[in-house]
């Protein structure tokens, strides 16, 4: 840009001065911009220096005094000092991130986020910076990252940005799964589902509730898992675009309830689904459920196995459903041992 401006001004110069100006030389060519240094030591040093500048820019002794040696007489000057501190802290976080200093970088982002949220009352900026801190911290430890995501969720909720908050809760839930903390994960999926619902995003609300329902089943909360799948099935049945998903979720809810051995309650649940969606009565999922119930009532383990095999040829069973069906096998055997018809 500078070179272009110089060229424009040179056109107005007398012709005898053109040759005297080095910028006008026909031999001179604009060089390719070299890449910035990637020396991590230099970036680390730069980051530390910027943090020191930020600390010097603002050392608060009270809520309204941001310097020990200077008193600002106006609110505007105080805000300018705050903005300068935030800017320097973010630059430091960026530099430390390039240097591979994830811990210090995440801390710096979080510091800038705290200043933005607490002092500047800018929840949107605070949420973005806490999220950035979490992304950097994930390279070290997902629990460390989740602490920052939790702060970001709080800031998003302050701004009524429920969908953005729900997306971060999903990320937290996935991080908990990585550490095999299933109970914590399902709690975050449940919270995410509620926030998606508050944001009017019904599809994502059902999707995250489905993941919570699966984890409830995996952690032994059979009734809660069955009820969650029931909620999803009913939600799907009430919307034309997803109505054909109803049998899939209804089947999961019913099969899980079979583990409780109260088959009168199972029949009531089947009736509820049929009332909500009459097409469920003719679905292959309901036919499969009746085959299972008949196998159990007749104590016929072979028929039970054949029913599972045949249905699996049509719709693949996996994960929680396979585990649940395996859990039903002892019930069939118990009935056979008792000689019950």
Image (cartoon, rainbow, N blue to C red):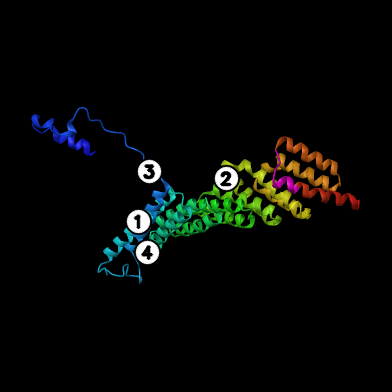
- Residue 45: percent from left, percent from top: 39, 53
Up the image or down, 282 lies above or below 49; here it is above
In front of the other: 319 or 102: 102
Q: Nearer the viewer, mark 3 or mark 4?
A: 3
Secondary element type, mark 1:
helix
Marks 4 and 2, how far apart at CA:
45 Å
Task: Find out whether the residues at labels 2 and 3 contact each other: C-beta distance under 8 Å.
Answer: no
* Residue found 81% across the figure and 43% down from its top: 304
Disc with the residue nearer the chain's start (4 vs 2)? 4
Disc with the residue nearer the chain's start (3 vs 1)? 3
Q: Is residue 218 left or right of residue 209?
A: right
Q: Nearer the viewer, mark 1 or mark 4?
A: 1
Q: Is residue 97 left or right of residue 21?
A: right
| Segment tinted magenta in the rendering | 316-324
Circle 4: is it few (<14), some (14-19), or many (20+) Cα within 10 Å?
some
Kindly identify which numbered label has been placed on residue 88.
1
In front of the other: 299 or 60: 60
Secondary element type, mark 3:
loop
Residue at image mark 2? 239
Marks 1 and 4, how far apart at CA:
16 Å
Disc with the residue nearer the chain's start (3 vs 4)? 3
* Residue found 69% across the figure and 55% down from its top: 219
């Amino acid at each position: 840009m500078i070179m272009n401006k110089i060229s424009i001004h040179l056109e107005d110069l007398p012709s005898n001065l053109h040759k005297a100006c080095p910028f006008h030389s026909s031999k001179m060519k604009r060089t390719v911009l070299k890449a910035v240094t990637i020396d991590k030591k230099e970036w680390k040093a730069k980051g530390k220096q910027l943090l020191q500048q930020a600390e010097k820019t603002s050392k608060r002794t009270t809520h309204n005094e941001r310097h020990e040696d200077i008193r600002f007489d106006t609110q505007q000057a105080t805000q300018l000092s705050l903005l300068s501190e935030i800017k320097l802290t973010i630059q430091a976080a960026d530099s430390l991130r390039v240097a591979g200093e994830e811990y210090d970088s995440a801390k710096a982002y979080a510091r800038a986020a705290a200043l933005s949220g607490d002092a500047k009352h800018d929840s949107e900026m605070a949420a973005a910076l806490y999220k950035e801190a979490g992304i950097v911290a994930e390279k070290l430890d997902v629990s460390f990252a989740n602490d920052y995501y939790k702060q970001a969720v709080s800031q998003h909720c302050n701004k009524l940005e429920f969908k953005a908050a729900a997306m971060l809760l999903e990320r937290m839930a996935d991080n908990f799964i990585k550490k095999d903390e299933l109970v914590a994960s399902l709690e975050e999926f449940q919270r995410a589902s509620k926030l998606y619902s508050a944001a009017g995003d019904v599809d994502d609300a059902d999707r995250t509730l489905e993941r919570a329902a699966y984890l409830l089943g995996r952690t032994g909360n059979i009734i809660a898992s069955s009820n969650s799948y029931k909620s999803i099935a009913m939600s799907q049945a009430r919307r034309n675009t997803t109505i054909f998903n109803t049998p899939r979720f209804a089947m999961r809810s019913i099969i899980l309830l079979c583990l409780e051995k109260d088959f009168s309650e199972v029949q009531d649940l089947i009736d509820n689904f049929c009332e909500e969606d009459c097409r469920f009565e003719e679905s292959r999922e309901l036919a499969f459920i009746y085959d299972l119930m008949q196998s159990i009532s007749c104590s016929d383990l072979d028929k039970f196995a054949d029913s599972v095999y045949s249905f699996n040829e049509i719709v693949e069973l996996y994960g929680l459903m396979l585990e649940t069906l395996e859990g039903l096998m002892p019930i069939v055997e118990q009935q056979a041992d008792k000689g019950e018809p």
